[in-house]
Image (spheres, rainbow, N blue to C red):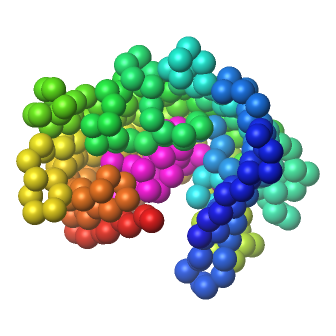
Amino acid sequence: MGTASQFHKYVKSTLNLERLRDGNWNVLDGILQIEPWKFFNVWMGRMLTPSDRSNLDGPYFLSTYAFPFVSQYPGAWSGRDDGITVWGKLVKDHFRYMAGVYRGHNWVQGGSNYGEHPLFAARLEYNFLDPEPSPAYYTASTYYGKADILAIGLAGQYETDGVGTAQDKGDYKAWNIDGLFEKKIGKNAKHGVYTLEGAYYQYYTGGVQDIASGYRQRAAEYGNVGGISDGTAFLASTAYLIPYTLGWGRLQPLVRYQEFRFKKDLYGSGHPKTTQFDAGANYVLDGHNLRFTLDYVRYHEAHTKASNAFLLGMQLQY
C-alpha cells in the first residue's frame, strides 16, 4: 500500500507500507523528497541505500522471481535504511550517482553498534547505450525490450563497529561491481530480447563473526541486525524474451548461478561455499506488473547436502 504527495514544485513525499507475515504493518518507504534539479536531489527518511543492482531492483523488478542470496547489503527492511541520500543524473541521464549517510547495522543492545556509528554508502553507474527508463536511482534487471541497456555500476558501504557483538566487534566494509546488458534483436525486437546480468561482491567483517540475523528482534529479517558474512560472492544470469505470443503473453526462459565463498577458516575449515542454480521461465503478460514464473532450484548450503525444489510464482502490481 502506498501514497505519493506533492507540496511544492520541488518538494514531494512517498509513503509505502507492507504487511508482514505476522499481520503487522511496516514502513517500507517513508521519504521526504527535495528535487530542485535533475542533477542534484535530496531524500530524507527510509529508503533504499546505495548498493548493488539487485537491491535497487527491489523484489519486484528482478529478472528472476527469487531475490539473490549473494546480495547481502544490510537494511532495516527489504534493503531500506533510515537516513539521507543525495542523488542525480547527468550526461543526458546516462550517468547516475547516489551517496548517503544512514542509521546503520547492529544498533541493538548487545550488538557491535549500540553506540550507533552511521553507515556510509555510495554508488556510481554509467549507461553506455540508452539511459535506463527506471525512475530516480532505482534499477531493474530487465526492461523487456523498452530500451537497449549496457550499464556498469560500482557501489560501496562502510560502518565502524558494524558487525559482531558488543564484546567482539569489527568494522563492516563491502563493495561490488555489477553490469546489465539487454539488447533488442532486430527492428522493434522482431527476434526477441536478450538479457545478460552479472555482479561481483566483497564483504568484510574485520575477522569476526556477526550476531544472528534479527538478534532480539521479532523476526530474523527485521531490524537491520546481524547476518553479515565475510566473503566473496558473484552471480551471473541470462534470459531471452521470445518474440512470439503464446496465449496472452510471452515466454522468457532464464538461468542464474550464484556462489558465496566464505572467508578462510572463519566459518569452518578452508573456504566453505554456498551455491544456487536456477533454471526456468517467466510467462510475461504485462512486464513487471503481471507475470508468472516456473523455476527449478538446486541449492547447496555450506556444510549441508544439496536440495532441489520447484518454484511456481505469480507477481501482480497495480
Question: Which residue is situated farthest in the right direction here?
Answer: 115
Is 89 positioned to the left or the right of 121 in the image? left
* Residue visible at 60% across and 18% down in the picture: 90
Question: Percent position (x, y) of residue 214?
Answer: 67, 67
In the image, 153 versus 3, the foreground residue is: 3
- Check the image and report above or below for 199 versus 305: above
In the image, 24 versus 244, the foreground residue is: 244
Q: Which residues are magenta?
A: 52-76
Please tell me in which quadrant of the rendered image residue 191 appears: top left
Question: Which residue is situated farthest in the top direction here?
Answer: 91
Q: State the quadrant of the N terminus.
A: bottom right
In the image, 45 versus 318, the foreground residue is: 318
Question: Percent position (x, y) of residue 86?
Answer: 74, 33
Marker count (numbered):
0
Was residue 75 drawn as part of the magenta stretch in this picture? yes
Question: Percent position (x, y) of residue 193?
Answer: 20, 36
Can residue 104 be seen here? no
Please tell me in which quadrant of the rendered image residue 166 appears: bottom right
Question: Percent position (x, y) of residue 229?
Answer: 57, 48
In the image, 154 versus 269, the foreground residue is: 154
Is 176 positioned to the left or the right of 190 in the image? right
Please tell me in which quadrant of the rendered image residue 96 appears: top right
Taken as a whole, is the magenta stretch helix, strand or loop?
loop
Was residue 237 drawn as part of the magenta stretch in this picture? no
- Check the image and report above or below for 37 versus 283: above
* Residue visible at 33% across and 31% down in the picture: 147
Question: Which residue is situated farthest in the bottom direction here?
Answer: 23
* Residue visible at 60% across and 84% down in the picture: 22
Is 112 positioned to the left or the right of 192 in the image? right
Q: State the quadrant of the C terminus.
A: bottom left
Can residue 88 be seen here? yes
* Residue visible at 34% across and 41% down in the picture: 143
